[in-house]
Amino acid sequence: MSKQYKKLQQKLHPKEKKTAPKEKPVGKDYVLIAVIGFIIVMTVFGWDYMNNISRAMYVLLGISMSCNYAQRHAKISEEKMVYVARLGLITIAIAVALFLVSLYYQFVA
């Protein structure tokens, strides 16, 4: 009796197959492109006016933002994606540290 009830339930209310959710297409990231362009322009035109710490900071920021863009748009393997993500995090951390050193030299020392 229970087998017939289960068959009847399956006919009346069939179970829907679970499908993997589709990934949203990646956007164009105009803001990120604008930030990368701004960093490049600031680095190129301000090179003569910057000290070595500022130069290194802007170069590292450019590398970090480029890694972020590559992480979103490049079609690379998961193993290489881990390296790109780590490189982006390391470069942004070093850039922040250089910014703090620059603040120290400018206001304290």
Image: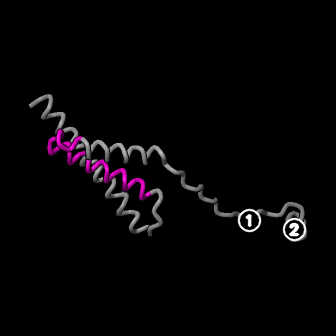
Q: Is residue 51 above or below residue 15?
A: above
Q: Which class describes the residues within 10 Å of circle 2: few (<14), some (14-19), or many (20+)?
A: few
Give the mark count.
Answer: 2
Percent coordinates x, y for residue 36 in the rendering: 37, 47
Percent coordinates x, y for residue 58 in the rendering: 26, 46
Query: What is the three-letter code of the residue carrying label 1?
Result: Lys
Q: Which residues are magenta?
A: 46-71
Percent coordinates x, y for residue 16 in the rendering: 77, 62
Looking at the rendered structure, the secondary structure element under dot 2 is helix
Query: Residue 76 is drawn in which quadrant?
Result: bottom left
Q: Residue at left 21%, top 38%?
A: 100
Locate the N terminus by quadrant: bottom right
User: Is residue 97 magenta-colored?
Assistant: no
Q: Residue at left 87%, top 63%?
A: 9
Q: Is residue 21 above or below residue 53?
A: below
User: Is residue 58 magenta-colored?
Assistant: yes
Q: Residue at left 64%, top 59%?
A: 21
User: Where does label 2 land, which residue?
Assistant: 2
